[in-house]
Every structure is written in C-alpha cells, then in structure tokens.
Amino acid sequence: MTVEQRKTKSGRAGSGTGVGLFSPVSAVRVSQVIVDQIRLLIQQGRLKTDDRLPSERDLCEQFGVSRVTVREALRVLESGGLIEIRVGARGGAFVSTPSSARVGEGLATLLKLSPLTAAEVTEARMVFELGIVPIVVDRATPEDIAALKEICERQQDALKDESYSMTLSAEFHVQVAACTHNAAIEMLVKSFHGPLLMSLEEAKVAAPVMGLLGSTEHREFVDAIERHDADQAAAIMRAHLQRTADRVAPNTPAC
Amino acid sequence: MTVEQRKTKSGRAGSGTGVGLFSPVSAVRVSQVIVDQIRLLIQQGRLKTDDRLPSERDLCEQFGVSRVTVREALRVLESGGLIEIRVGARGGAFVSTPSSARVGEGLATLLKLSPLTAAEVTEARMVFELGIVPIVVDRATPEDIAALKEICERQQDALKDESYSMTLSAEFHVQVAACTHNAAIEMLVKSFHGPLLMSLEEAKVAAPVMGLLGSTEHREFVDAIERHDADQAAAIMRAHLQRTADRVAPNTPAC
DNA sequence: GAGGGCTATTGGTAGGACCATATTGCCGGT
DNA sequence: ACCGGCAATATGGTCCTACCAATAGCCCTC
C-alpha cells in the first residue's frame, strides 16, 4: 500500500491534504468522495454499461485509500444500482444500467415509510394513468393494440382456471404505458406497478368478481383505443381505476 | 469481540450456521442480512423516526460480526436514506424518514443514465402537472392561494433585480402540487423539480424574457384557480409547460 | 473432452490509531 | 456565593493495516 501521501501510518488521507498548509480539511467522508467520482465518471459516459472497474486493490492504490474505504464506496454504488459486484476470478465491479425496478423499489420504501395513505398513492397513480390516455390514443400502433389484446386474452384464460392475479393486471397497465412510446412514462408506470402495489394491496385475488370486471374493462378500453375515442377510453380507465381506489380507500391502512 | 459463535478466528459467521449440519450456507452477504434486518425493523415501525440505533461497536457485538461489516450495512442504509449518521458524542445512526429529495435523486440518476431524451422526461412531467390541475382547483384553500400569490410576488421582485432563477419557478410548481393536499403527489412533483430539472436544463437563466413570461403565466394561473376555472387553469398550465418543452426539445440532449 | 488445480478477486475478521463533539466539572473572577 | 470560560473525559464515527476464507473463471493435464 502506498503511504507516501500520508505522514503517519494512519493519518487521514483526505484528498491529498496533510501537507500542513492548512488546506481545508476534507470535511466530507472519503468514501463519499470516491462514490461521487465514480458516479460522475458513469454519468459522463466515460464508464459505460458492462465496463469493469479496476479491482478493489487497484482502486485503493489509485485513490490512495485503504480497501475498507473503497469497499464502502462500492457498497453505496451497488445499493444505488449503478454497479453490480461479482465475486470470483474475473469478478469485480461492473457498471450496470439501473433498472426501473430499482427505482421503483426506492419509491416503494419511500412511500411505505412516509405517512402516506394508500388512498393518496392511488390518487397519484390515477392522475398519471389517466393523463397518458390521450397520448396513448394518439400514438398507439396496430402492434401496440395487438399486444394489448393478447394480454386481454391471457386474462380471460386466467379467469377460467382461476389463476388470475394482480400481476396480469399490472402487465396490462404497463403495456398501456408502453403505447405512449415514451420511455420515461413507461418507467414511471412500471415503478408504480412494481413492489409498490404488490405491497399496498395485499387483497390481491380477494374478489374473483373483481378480476372479471377488471378484465372486461380492459377489453373495452382497448376497443376505445382502437376507435381513437380518447374521451371514451379516458372514461373507462377512470371508472376502472376508481373502483380500485374505492376498494383501497375504506381500509385506509396508512402504511 | 465475542468469538464463541465461530469455529476459527475468521470463519464465516453466516446466520448462526456452522454447526456442521449442512445448513444452507449463507449465500448472501452478511452485511446485506444486517441491512435487511434493520430495514425490516424500520418498516415494521419497531424503530421510529429519530430513534437512535446502538453504536457501531454495540451493533457488531449484537450481530456477532466485525465493525467493517456493520459499517458497510450502515452505509447502504444511509445511502438509501433510511438512516442518518452523525459523528461526535451523542452521534450515531438515527432513523430518518426518507425525503423526497432522496428518491428524486435516485429518479434523476435513473433518468440520466437511461437512454431517455429530455423531451420524454418533460412530457412525463407535463402529464402529471396537468393532471393534477382539476384536483388543485377543487381543493385549494384560501391559504394555499395566498401562498401561491406570495411566491408570484417574490418572482416579480426577483425579475426586477435580475435574480430570477429556475429555483423560484420550481418553488411555484411544488406549491401548486401542495394544493392537492396529497402528500404522494407533492412528493412526486418535488422529485421532478429536484436534481432532475436542475441537471436537465443547464440553460437556466438563458432567456430573461422567459422569466417574465413564465412569471406572468404563474400569476394568471393563480387567478384561474381562484375563480375555480379548471379549464382555463389547465389551458394556462399547458401553454406554460409547452413552452418549456419546446425549449428543451430542439436540443435533444439525450442525457 | 472432462476434471482438477491455479489464480485473481471479493467477503469477512481483528485490532488499533485518530478525529469530532457533547458533557462535565474545575477554577478563577466577580 | 454565583457564573462564565476552559480543559478533561466519554462517546462514537472514520480510516488504516494485515490476514484468512470462499468463490468462480481459466488453463492445463490426463
């Protein structure tokens, strides 16, 4: 381990400080500085997806810190979804594109830990999913509509053998968002339908009649889209979401 | 350090495994297990906001791991916004309610690292901020409207001495979201106006005329709210956001 | 071609030195 | 006797060194 920057064997490395010229002492954590540096490198595109960072030992040498510090930085980056760490030979830290699942998870814990009622979350979801309807009507391609119909059919089948679940419904709503051909919107809706709803509505398959109704509405919605009838589509979606909202409101399970 | 659970001085602690009964070796990281445990405690409400966790040294003893491992776990929790770490006497790890800023940051990096165009993000923002207008009109109290007017006045003042900045505009939009009296919506809008827009539109004070126009529209919007004229308010907001969208679209700076 | 050793790399431990900060208590001045 | 400032102490995070264990891809041998 190179020690030339440090006077004593465990003097704070800081950021090259320690020469005694009263340089502003690094008030921030060393590991945080490393996190920021690597994050910046990734955001600038100088480190691309699947690129491999140097090994922990190399990094300590380059940063002039100990392995522990580097590892803390890697942990933070990993928990933020920016890198993925693999063990074993040819292992190491690899840059990974953060998935919507990751951010959805963060959003879910945020909502769970905050004093938010399920009703509030549902309302926010309604605003968003209703707001995109005009865009969906405008941009949905025949392929999009075919994909939606395919999901509807799978839901009908699932209803028959009673395997209908919240997951199928979520799939439909995500596919609707995909019809906007806007990756940002799709990602946000995905975030909503990720761990969030799963945790919020434990009453998943509570009412079988729910599934039947929901499935029918899904189909009517697709038809409206196909007719380019934005008003009708919005009305259906509003009723569809409102029913979910009504079901979730009475419980008012704060978290 | 208590070592009684471990056979050798550095045997993997696992989760109390090691008795030799071929118990499934803890394939996961020890620090991750600690993270999960503490996270669970917080989500269950057994650790509440501002509660103080035991000190690092106590935690190692209770978990039967080394300090490095505990510290890695604390780092992850801190980066996730679940705890806040203070140094010095009476310091330690304190449970903190994750702020919208934190999740907004995660959202921002996600959006920046994903192949999203600024136009897509702006469109998503438009959908949301337009969608809440009816709710705002419906629920805004006189106090809410007074707060909005106050911001407008501050913007007028700022225009005079040329200190108008994006921050003031963001403040207005967040206050509008607050008028919904829905914490989830407010948090999402805050997330949008957090680090995301700041990084997206470096052209902050590019056009002074922009600020003038924007400020005027803000004021007209408030008036429409006061009249409970949802259509007019939505129209103003649409034009207002559209102008921002148009400004950001031509550049098409992917990230 | 299949299997076993090699090696690079992460995961974890122990123990210690250092730094930051709040509390406490002493001491001198008033 | 009271009070303000200052130093000692206790608490607790931050970082270091050195070591060992587990893992997984690669290559070499059979």
Image: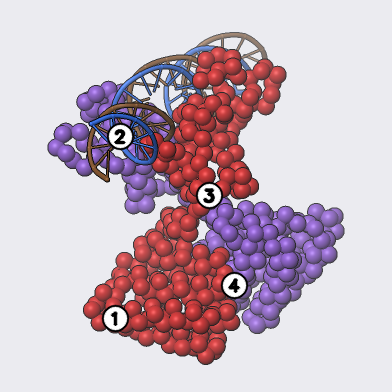
Chain colours: A red, B purple, C brown, D blue
Question: Considering only vertical position in the picture, is B30 above or below A125?
Answer: above
Q: Residue furthest left?
A: B21
Q: Is residue B123 visible?
A: yes
Q: Which residue is mark 3?
A: A49
Question: Neighbour class for label 2 at 10 Å: few (<14), some, many (≥20)?
Answer: some
Question: Considering only vertical position in the picture, is B71 above or below C30?
Answer: below
From the viewer's perspective, is the residue at label 1 or at label 4 nearer?
Answer: 1
Q: Say which amino acid is labelled 3.
A: Thr
Image coords of residue A42 (percent x, y): 58, 46
Mark 2 or mark 4: whose residue is earlier in sequence: 2
Q: Say which amino acid is labelled 1.
A: Asp
Question: Neighbour class for label 3 at 10 Å: few (<14), some, many (≥20)?
Answer: some
Q: CA distance from mark 2 to mark 4?
A: 47 Å
Q: Say which amino acid is labelled 2.
A: Phe
Can marks 2 and 4 be said to lie on one chain? yes
Q: Which residue is mark 1?
A: A157
Q: Which residue is mark 2?
A: B63
Nearer to the camera, A57 or B187 = A57
Residue depicted at 34% across the width and 49% down the height: B40
Image coords of residue A219 (percent x, y): 41, 85
Q: Which residue is mark 4?
A: B127
| Label ID, residue A192 | none
Circles 2 and 1, Cβ within 8 Å, touching? The answer is no
Q: CA distance from mark 3 to mark 1?
A: 39 Å
Q: CA distance from mark 3 to mark 2?
A: 36 Å
Q: Secondary structure at mark 4?
A: helix
Q: Say which amino acid is labelled 4.
A: Val
From the viewer's perspective, is the residue at label 3 or at label 2 nearer?
Answer: 3
From the viewer's perspective, is the residue at label 2 or at label 4 nearer?
Answer: 4
Circles 3 and 2, Cβ within 8 Å, touching? The answer is no
Image mark 2: chain: B
Image coords of residue D6 (percent x, y): 61, 15
